[in-house]
Each structure stands twice: as structure tokens, then as C-alpha cells.
Amino acid sequence: MNDKLTIRPATEADLPAIVAMLADDPLGATRESPDDLTPYLAAHHRIAADPHQHLVVAELAGQVIGTLQLTVIPGLSRRGATRTLVEAVRIHADARGTGLGTTLIEWAVDQSRALGAELVQLTSDATRTDAHRFYERLGFTASHVGFKLALG
């Protein structure tokens, strides 16, 4: 059995595991539908077709145990700086507390540098205080207040 962690692009075959992780918490349970993968498949096709999107999974011993999406955003502010946005970071319940989250975020930061980004940003739901401490421990600063407007 291979016990080497691999971070690789997500495939359609990974969608059930990814969606299960997205749904496996109180917030995700109210907004995800693991029983119908149709919208996730369509989203995966859009993500895979966009070179600025990097949806990845962390795999260990043939099991998907983590995921995140990294988006590259070219911009004018900060003297034309490119930034990346880290979204949908999830770790399988059985792998939480093992350092996998740190490994995934470090991968995202390293990948951001390799893609020419000058800034990595992310958001975390205001209720996820453990996640806030985790990101601050990794050097992120809670420098802004985020706002969202649901359109549907």
C-alpha cells in the first residue's frame, strides 16, 4: 500500500469524494447534495476548461482525503499584481488533525508563487473559528471583512 501523499488535479471520478467532504459539516450539509452529482459534474467541466482554475485533491493510499480550489486572478490593483484565491478547502473527517490541511495550504502558496502571484487570499465563514486560528497560524492575516450576496 502506497502511503505517499499525492496532490493532483481532480478528475470526474473524484467528484463523489469531493462532494462528500463539502457536505460533511453543519454548513455544507445545508447547501450540498451528494445524492445528485449532475451540477457538480457541470461545474467540474467549467473548472477544467479554465486555465486559471486549479481544483485539486490530496490522495493517500488510493483514497481522496482532501481538496481545494485555487483560482488565479489577474488584477490592476497593487501595481497590476496577480493574486490567487483559495476556496473550498476540505479535509476528510478521518484525516483531520494529521497536518494534511497545512500541507494543502502550503501547496497552494507554493503553487501561487510558481504561477506568478504576489498575494494569496481566502475567505472562511465567520462561524469557523477553528479555521481562522489555523489560517492565522500559517501566516494569513484577517485583514478584510468579506461580504456575499446570494443571487439564487
Image: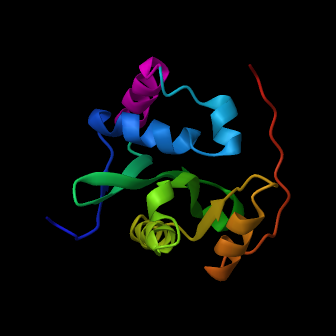
How many numbered marks does the figure carry?
0
| Quadrant of residue 44 within the rendered picture | top left
Image position, residue 134 (x, y; %): 65, 73
- Nearer to us in this view, 43 or 102: 102
Image position, residue 12 (x, y; %): 30, 33
- Nearer to us in this view, 73 or 87: 87
Q: Residue furthest left?
A: 1
> Can residue 132 be seen at all in this image of the molecule?
yes
| Quadrant of residue 139 within the rendered picture | bottom right
Query: Overall secondary structure of the magenta stretch?
Result: helix
Query: In the shown orientation, is residue 116 left or right of residue 58?
Result: right
Quarter containing the C terminus = top right
**In the rendered view, how is the structure colored?**
rainbow
Magenta residues (range): 36-50
Q: Is residue 80 above or below residue 68?
A: below
Residue sitting at 41 percent across and 64 percent down?
Answer: 115
Residue sitting at 72 percent across and 74 percent down?
Answer: 133
Image position, residue 72 (x, y; %): 51, 53
- Nearer to us in this view, 99 or 114: 99
> Can residue 50 be seen at all in this image of the molecule?
no
